């Protein structure tokens, strides 16, 4: 392995560099790549490394397995959060999506399966979204009494227009690729 090709193995994120491309893979397929605190911290580290490595010219973000890019927040973790902990996680998510959006290098979301809630927000933060025919996008968190907490309401309106964004966010509707 030469200096341009490296592999960093984390617990929840696979991070690999091949030549000038960094590959970031959400790696919790058994729980549809649900976003927990540990995964978000590792995602931030991977994108910071990509940003700071001058050999990296672009990043591809995807999810492990064939069922989900990321199915949103890890509900089992959310169920026990206090309001303060929920706000902290929202701020962490905002920091990660802002890092992705402002990386200074193109980031391509390769979306397979579900991209819901925070997963949809991660995809929206990317420069380009490429979706498999089976991809499903949405912000269904309204159905459990929360809102897109990673800046998704703003990004979605910029991507699809205010009216369609409101329809998607307020209804919790899931749309196909």
Image (tube, grey):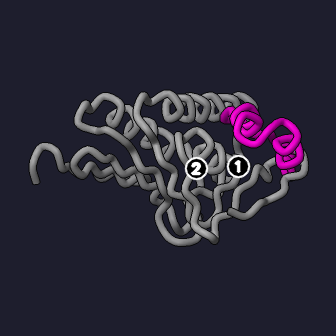
Relative placement, left or right, of 40 versus 155 is left
State which quadrant residue 98 falls in. Answer: top right
| Secondary structure predominantly adopted by residues drawn in magenta | helix
Residue under label 2:
35
Q: What quarter of the picture does the N terminus occupy? A: bottom left
Segment tinted magenta in the rendering: 142-169
Mark 2, secondary structure of its residue: loop
Q: Is residue 158 above or below residue 165?
A: above
Q: Is residue 86 visible in the rendered structure shown here?
A: no
In the image, what residue occupies the spot 40% across and 50% down? 24
Q: Is residue 154 above or below residue 7?
A: above
State which quadrant residue 125 falls in. Answer: top right
* Front-lying residue, 75 or 96: 96
Which x, y percent locates residue 37? 54, 42
Query: Residue at the left extreme?
Result: 2
In the image, what residue occupies the spot 42% across and 42% down? 42
Q: How many marks?
A: 2
CB under 8 Å between discs 2 and 1:
yes
Residue under label 1:
117
Which x, y percent locates residue 74? 64, 53
In the image, what residue occupies the spot 73% across and 39% down? 156
* Front-lying residue, 44 or 82: 44
Which x, y percent locates residue 170? 89, 45
* Front-lying residue, 80 or 14: 14
What separation in Å lies between label 2 and label 1 (alpha carbons)?
A: 10 Å
Residue 138 is marked as: none
In the image, what residue occupies the spot 72% across and 34% down? 158
**146 inside magenta stretch:** yes
Q: Is residue 76 above or below residue 107?
A: below
**26 inside magenta stretch:** no
Mark 2: give few (<14), some (14-19) or many (20+) Cα within 10 Å: many
Label 2 or label 1, whichever lies nearer to me, is: 1
């Amino acid at each position: 392995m030469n200096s341009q090709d490296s592999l960093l193995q984390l617990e929840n994120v696979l991070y690999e560099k091949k030549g000038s491309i960094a590959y970031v893979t959400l790696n919790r397929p058994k729980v549809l790549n649900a976003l927990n605190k540990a995964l978000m911290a590792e995602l931030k580290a991977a994108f910071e490394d990509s940003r700071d490595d001058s050999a990296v010219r672009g990043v591809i973000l995807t999810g492990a397995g064939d069922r989900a890019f990321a199915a949103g927040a890890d509900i089992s973790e959310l169920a026990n959060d206090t309001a303060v902990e929920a706000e902290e996680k929202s701020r962490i998510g905002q920091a990660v999506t802002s890092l992705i959006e402002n990386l200074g290098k193109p980031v391509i979301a390769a979306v397979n399966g579900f991209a819901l809630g925070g997963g949809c927000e991660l995809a929206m933060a990317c420069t380009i979204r490429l979706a498999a025919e089976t991809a499903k996008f949405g912000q269904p968190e309204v159905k459990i009494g929360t809102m897109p907490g990673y800046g998704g309401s703003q990004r979605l309106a910029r991507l699809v227009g205010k009216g369609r964004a409101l329809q998607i966010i307020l209804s919790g509707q899931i749309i196909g690729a």
